[in-house]
Image: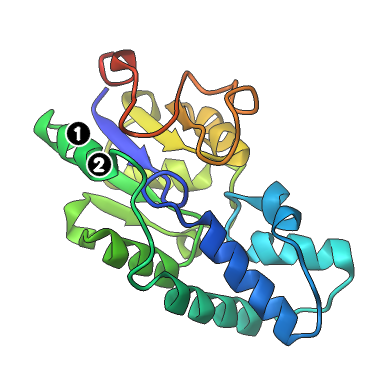
């Protein structure tokens, strides 16, 4: 093991309720009432699919670029001073650094959301060796592309990397990329993340084996 690749939402920050609320408000502006539960099947797939999947199921016409931008604008307003790191997130990042591991963020979200999250987390992009966002890959999770891009950016083979994920689609993407995977049960239970090599409730309770191979 030489590198750790972090998903962002649900792994480093507790952002899922905020992006769901932002999307709900965006749809409300268009005259539609959407529940938070309707977004659940699309967690971890990037906002194109997060809002687009709900729109498809409801038969709602979207202007993808405009409506996603509006969702992000609402999100940025909602999270200021309110977004919290997951338990142990900052400490775990520091621990990985202390072990001499390369670290990267690989998020299916657009750069504007990634930067907002890092801002609220109190971390600079420079705190990581690489930051890959959803605009840098064509195929989103559960395709492995974003994690393969992160491995390339770290100049490491997938077999040398641990991916930390919270979503079913993210775990599938990590395993398809050929990495090992730690699944955090911040969004789904351990049964749903059974394909991961290890599971933990958060980054404050990571099994020793996940960092010792």
- Identify the residue at image location x=56%, y=31%: 176
Number of other residues with Cα within 10 Å of mark 2, as a class: few under 14, some 14 to 19, many 20 or more: many
Above-or-below relation of 62 to 52: below
- Identify the residue at image location x=47%, y=47%: 10
Q: Are marks 1 and 2 in contact (CB under 8 Å)?
A: yes
Task: Please tell me which residue lies in front, 70 or 148.
Answer: 70
Q: Which color scheme did the rendering employ for the protein? A: rainbow
- Left/right of residue 32 with respect to residue 174 in the rendered view: right
Q: Position of residue 66 (x, y in %)?
A: 62, 85
Q: Position of residue 145 (x, y in %)?
A: 51, 46
Q: Quadrant of the C terminus?
A: top left
- Left/right of residue 99 with respect to residue 170 in the rendered view: left
Above-or-below relation of 176 to 134: above
Asked whether residue 179 is in view, the answer is no
Q: Position of residue 151 (x, y in %)?
A: 35, 40
Q: Which residue is mark 1?
A: 96
């Amino acid at each position: 093991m030489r590198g750790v690749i972090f998903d962002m939402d649900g792994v480093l920050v507790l952002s899922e309720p905020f992006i769901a609320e932002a999307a709900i408000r965006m749809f409300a502006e268009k005259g539609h009432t959407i529940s938070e539960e309707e977004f659940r099947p699309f967690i971890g797939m990037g906002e194109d699919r997060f809002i687009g999947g709900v729109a498809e199921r409801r038969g709602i016409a979207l202007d993808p670029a405009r409506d996603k931008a509006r969702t992000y604008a609402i999100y940025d307003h909602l999270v200021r001073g309110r977004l919290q790191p997951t338990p142990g997130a900052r400490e775990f990042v520091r621990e990985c650094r202390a072990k001499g591991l390369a670290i990267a963020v690989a998020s299916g979200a657009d750069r504007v959301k990634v930067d907002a999250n890092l801002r609220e987390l109190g971390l600079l992009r420079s705190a990581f060796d690489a930051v890959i966002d959803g605009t840098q890959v064509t195929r989103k999770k559960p395709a492995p592309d974003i994690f393969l891009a992160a491995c390339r950016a770290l100049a490491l083979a997938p077999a040398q990397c641990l991916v930390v994920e919270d979503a079913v689609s993210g775990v599938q993407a990590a395993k398809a990329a050929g990495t090992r995977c730690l699944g955090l049960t911040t969004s789904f239970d351990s049964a749903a993340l059974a394909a991961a090599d290890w599971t933990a409730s958060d980054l404050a309770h990571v099994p020793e084996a996940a960092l010792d191979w």
